[in-house]
Image (cartoon, grey):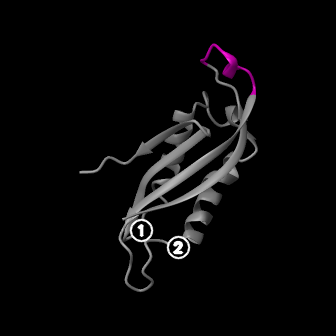
Amino acid sequence: MFITREFTFSAAHNLTNYHGKCEELHGHTFKLSITLEGSPIEEDGMIVDFIALKSIVQENILNLLDHKYLNNIFKNPTCENIVSWIFNKLDPVLKGENYSLYEVRLWESSESSVTLRRETG
């Protein structure tokens, strides 16, 4: 079973190894989707409480990226690099007896996104 929680954050960046409009400073309202794979536990019937998931993502990701200049965090803040960073930061903290991080998806715009998914069996 999979559960997903979506978030938004705003940030500015410029692409350092790019020749075009995106090499100039610009901003986005990013949409972030975090998906966990797991099994509900019998006591409460949940994989994980959505409030707990929100708190973990807020503390480990949103507090670090929201309203920031992403070039201060990433050498080249492409959507691909940001997704990899988010996955690697959340993977160790989104592990429970009954669940683990499965997928991180980041939309740079309503038309463009990057997805990183855990390889399965």
The quadrant of the image that shows the N terminus is bottom left
Quarter of the figure with residue 30: top right
| Residue at 68% over, 36% down | 70
Seen in the picture, residue 45 relative to 11 is either above or below; the reply is: below
Amino acid beneath label 1:
Gly
Q: Nearer the viewer, mark 1 or mark 2?
A: 2
Q: Give coordinates of residue 111: x percent, y percent.
A: 58, 36
Picture disc at residue 49: 2
Is 110 displayed left or right of 1 in the figure? right
Is 89 displayed left or right of 95 in the figure? right
| Residue at 62% over, 33% down | 74
Q: Residues under labels 1 and 2: Cα distance?
A: 12 Å
Q: What element carries label 1?
A: loop
Question: 110 or 115: nearer the eye?
Answer: 110
Is 23 displayed left or right of 99 in the figure? right
Q: What element carries label 2?
A: loop
Judge the density around disc 1: few (<14), some (14-19), many (≥20) Cα neighbours within 10 Å: few
| Residue at 61% over, 31% down | 77
Picture disc at residue 43: none
Q: Mark 1 points at which residue?
A: 96
Q: Give coordinates of residue 96: x percent, y percent.
A: 41, 68
Q: What stretch is highlighted in magenta?
A: 17-25
Question: 35 or 71: nearer the eye?
Answer: 35
Seen in the picture, residue 67 relative to 98 is either above or below; the reply is: above
Q: Is residue 18 magenta?
A: yes
| Residue at 69% over, 48% down | 9
- Mark 1 or mark 2: name the one nearer the start of the chain: 2
